[in-house]
Every structure is written in C-alpha cells, then in structure tokens.
Amino acid sequence: MPAFRCLCRLLAALLLSVATLGVFAGAAAAQAIPPRTPIVLFPAFHFTRLLVNVQNQQVDPSCPASGSFEDWYPNPTPSATFSRVCMDKLMTLRYDGDPSLPMPDRFSNQQGVTVAMSDYGKTASAPAYEQMYASLEQAGWRRDVSIRVAGYDSRLTPDMGGFLSRTRHLIEKTYAANGNRRVHLVGHSNGPLYAQYLLTHSSESWKRKYIQGFTPIAGNFPGQGAMYGYLFTGLNLTTFTLPDTQEIAESSARMLISAPSTYMSAAAPSTFGTDEVVIADAGTGKQYTPADYHALVTAPGMPPEAAEIADYYIGFVRFQDGDPTSILPTSTNLPNVDVYAEKGSGIPTLVGVTLHDLTVGQVFDSALPVFTRDGDGNEEDITNNAIQVWSAMPCHHFTLTDNSGLDHFSLAFDSAVLSRLMVNAQKTPTVCQS
C-alpha cells in the first residue's frame, strides 16, 4: 500500500506538471498574437440585411397583404412571394410636408410596414463582406468580438432612425469587450458618410476615448453623378442593375425619390458645380449638371416633396471646413481622427446618361449616349479625390492611397488594401493637444 500511495503521488505530480506546461504553452500562444484593435465596419448602400414585415398593407392590392421579406445585396434567395415591384412599393417612404416638423421626422414607413435590421452589430448583418471578415480572422481578429458591423437602413440618412445613439452604443460595447481598446472604423462606399457624420457629431473627448482611426474605402462624401439618373430610370436593388422593365423602373425610381439617402448620395453642387453632365434630355437637347439639380427634381412627374428633400439633403454630410452652407452644429467638418483613405482609379466610370425625356420610370435606352469620367467604375475621380481636403487636419494623420485599376467593389476585398488596414488599425493614435 505505501508503494501504491507513492505511485499515486508521482502520477499526480506528473499530471500537475503537464497541466502547468499546458497553461504556460497556452499563455505563450496568446502572447504570440497580440490583442487586435477592434474594427467596426460601416457597409455600402443596401449591403445591410433589412427585414421587412408586412401586416394588412393597403399600398397595392396586387401585392401580398401580409408576410415578410429580406432586402439586401447580394441576397442569393430573394423573396418568392414579394416581387421586386412589391418590395419597392412597400419600402417607398411616406412624407409629411408639415413645415413645423423637423425634416428627419417627416419620413415614415407605409402603413402596415415595419423595417428592422437583421443581426445588427454582427458580421451576419452584412454577408457581402465575408472575404474581409475571413482575412481579418486569419490575422487574429475575432468575428462578432473584434469585428463588428454598424449597419443602417440604406433609405435613411444618419440623422434618422436612431443611428447616432445606436452606433455609439455599439462602439462603446466593442471597446469594453476588447479590453478597453480603441476602435478602428472602416467604411465602404456610402458607409463612410455615416461614419463621418458620427465623427463630426461626437465630442472630441468621446473620440479620444473610443476611436483609434478611420479607413474610408471609396467614400462617397460629396456624392456621385450617376445618382441623378436613378431618379428617372430607377435601380433594381436585387441585381444592382438598371431595370429592364418599365414596371420595375417606375417602382424603384419612386422608392429612390422618396428616400433622403438618394439625395445625400447625389453629386453636390458645392463640390461638382458644372464639371460633369449628369442628365441629357434627348427631346430638348438640354444638358444638366449637378448645379442644375433643382430643375431635375422639379421635372414633370416628380412629387412636390422631391425639391424639399433635395434642398435639405444634397451635400448633407459635410466633410470640409469653410463651407458657408454648412448646417452642422459642430465647430468643424473634419473628422479629427487619424485617416487612412483608399480609392480606385483608371476605370471609365458612368456619371451621366441621356434620357428620351424627364419622365419618371423609363427604361434606359442603351443606344443613347452616356457620359463617363475616370474613376473606380462606380464613383468618379471628383468624388474619390474630394477627401484630400482632410490633409488640412491640424494634427491628425491623413493618407489617401490610389489603387489604380482596382474597381469600387473589389477595393474592400483586395489583399493589399486589407493588409494596410490591418497595419494601420494597430498603430498608436496621434496624440493632439486639446
């Protein structure tokens, strides 16, 4: 028995040593990959999964009275119950023209329709970025812990829908869940507008505590010329192509006309002026530039509220100081965080179309001339270069990297772009005197 007890003690000591070695090995492995700066992604236009619930709708009797559908790009299984036309009609916003109401409060969903974000904050809320998430995971980031997604309803502007409070809360939770490490913001396409609005509507002390830096990828800050054409031709949001039927052209055009984000995303005259043609009317021979936007939004067939919405939301997200039309309550329109911007170039990019006339809901005739500029295939050079005004930030770092030949949507998944993101996200933020 004494010998047996000795053997037991020896085995116990051996097991304790192995366990201790395992703990040390685990600690060494953890130290081999240092903690990662958490990343919060602001997705592109219509890349956030939206769940639309319909209950006894009265919008169109030819559409299902009740049910639900998800609307996002690129949804591999679009609704078999709700057609594209029905989805457009049910997601067209209502507008209350009461001048006593603040502009953001004038918009509402159709009666019987509610819209919510699916899996808000999680990577599952924006599946199109799976390649980005996978690359970050391979480098040590953790999905839904140090990779989070600040989605939004793409019809709405960042002054609506509780965007500011919801996004600040997500960033603060992400900060706390990652050992109180400051967060790096990443935005793609329209996403950077929402991130910029957050930065210019948050205090400097909040940014110093929670924000490490910002990577805007092809940020659509001053808008793009092509958006004006969609007011007349619509855009099929299932396929992200111009509609090939008059019915979808009209339903999608009407939906886009009702959405304030359409105007926020359209080329702002304060940046573009008369530098590009966005619409040519084949019937009259007249050409329209961003400076002529008011003539476009008051064309026959446009609802009367289109001009009111356009006047308020075109150029809404300010991104440079010295703009006399600024309506922001903050003292600066510069983000005042370290910025590592990415853009594409060298690709002919559509900025304007020729239409038979200014009828809302027409199928685009590919035989008519179009207008292009250099760009990334989606946004033109004027848009992509406008962010250079951020080099005027008095203290914070700013770079703009040109990825020649890389198209707008590939930018967010390019290995070189993602490698720079990973490096920049780990940098020590600039310390500025308050």
Image (spheres, helix red, strand yellow):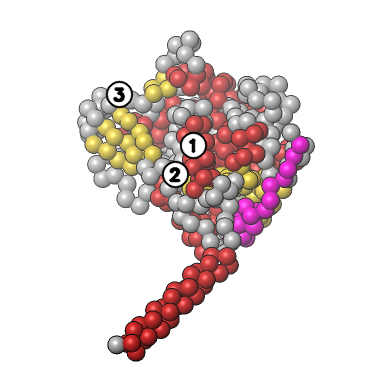
Residue 316 at x, y = what percent? Answer: 59, 27
Is the C-beta separation of discs 2 and 3 under 8 Å? no
**Distance of label 2 from label 3 (alpha carbons):** 27 Å
The residue beneath circle 1 is 169
User: Is residue 100 shown to the viewer in this render?
Assistant: yes
The residue beneath circle 3 is 111
Between 401 and 233, the residue placed more toward the observer is 401
SS for callout 3 = loop
Q: Nearer the viewer, mark 2 or mark 1?
A: 1
Q: Nearer the viewer, mark 2 or mark 3?
A: 2
Between 129 and 384, the residue placed more toward the observer is 129
Going from the N terminus, do you reach mark 2 or mark 3 first? 3
Specify start and end residues of the magenta stretch as a single range: 415-433
Up/down of 400 relative to 301, above or below: below
**Distance of label 1 from label 3 (alpha carbons):** 30 Å
Is the C-beta separation of discs 2 and 1 under 8 Å? no
Between 42 and 388, the residue placed more toward the observer is 42
- Amino acid type, callout 1: His
Mark 2 nearby-residue class (10 Å; few <14, some 14–19, many ≥20): many
Residue 37 at x, y = what percent? Answer: 58, 52
The residue beneath circle 2 is 121
Going from the N terminus, do you reach mark 2 or mark 1 first? 2
Seen at 33% across and 87% down, the residue is 2
